[in-house]
Image (cartoon, rainbow, N blue to C red):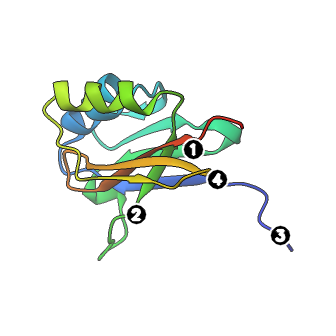
């Protein structure tokens, strides 16, 4: 039995409004479904989903996950993050694989943006 795809990744959001602003206005995701201040789900490439959830929607003791979003222009996203007041915590060049940068969302969850290296 094999895993077919990433179905869903969700993170706890202490402030849904701030989280929605971060993921929609800063990262550039479009909401697929929202349940008020409890849950917002976004479509992800490949048919999977990413969501932010209010604490009451999360299992007790939930520790955060790291969501990784692939982007075309990492430098443009980095500039957009900095302009929004989001500090870039780390940058990593993985050579022929690509580059990644790490930030925190408004609830303190780690988020990474990844750009593939140009084809040689």
Is there CB contact under 8 Å for labels 1 and 4? yes
Classify 10 Å Cα crowding around label 2: few (below 14), some (14-19), many (20 and above): few
Look at the numbered disc 3 and give the secondary structure of its residue: loop
As measured in the structure, the alpha-carbon distance from the residue carrying label 2 to the one carrying label 4 is: 14 Å
User: Is 32 located above or below residue 86 in the figure?
Assistant: above
Name the outermost residue toward the front: 120
Tell me the quarter of the picture where residue 26 sits.
top left
Q: Which of marks 1 and 4 is nearer the N terminus?
A: 4
In the rendered image, the residue lying farthest to the right is 1
| SS for callout 4 | loop
> What percent of the width, then of the height, locates residue 28?
41, 25
Residue identifier under label 4: 7
Mark found first going from the N terminus, 2 or 1? 1
Choose mark 2 or mark 1, whichever is in front: 2
Point out the tag, 4 or 3, that comes first from the N-terminus: 3
Q: From mark 3 to mark 1, how far is it between C-alphas?
A: 19 Å
Q: Position of residue 47 (x, y in %)?
A: 69, 40
Q: What element carries label 2?
A: loop
100 sits to left or right of 118: left
CA gap between label 2 and label 1 equals 14 Å
* Residue at the image point whose x is 18% and y is 38% from the top: 86
Q: What residue would you read off at disc 2?
A: 65
């Amino acid at each position: 039995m094999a895993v077919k795809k990433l179905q869903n990744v969700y993170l706890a959001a202490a402030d849904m409004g701030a989280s929605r602003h971060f993921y929609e206005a800063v990262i550039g995701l479009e909401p697929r479904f929202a349940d008020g201040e409890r849950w917002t789900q976004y479509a992800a490439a490949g048919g999977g989903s990413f969501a932010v959830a209010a604490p009451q929607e999360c299992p007790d003791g939930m520790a955060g996950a790291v969501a990784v979003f692939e982007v075309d222009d990492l430098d443009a996203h980095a500039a957009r993050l900095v302009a929004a007041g989001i500090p870039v915590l780390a940058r990593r060049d993985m050579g022929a694989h690509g580059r990644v940068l790490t930030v925190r969302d408004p609830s303190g969850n780690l988020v990474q943006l990844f750009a593939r290296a140009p084809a040689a």
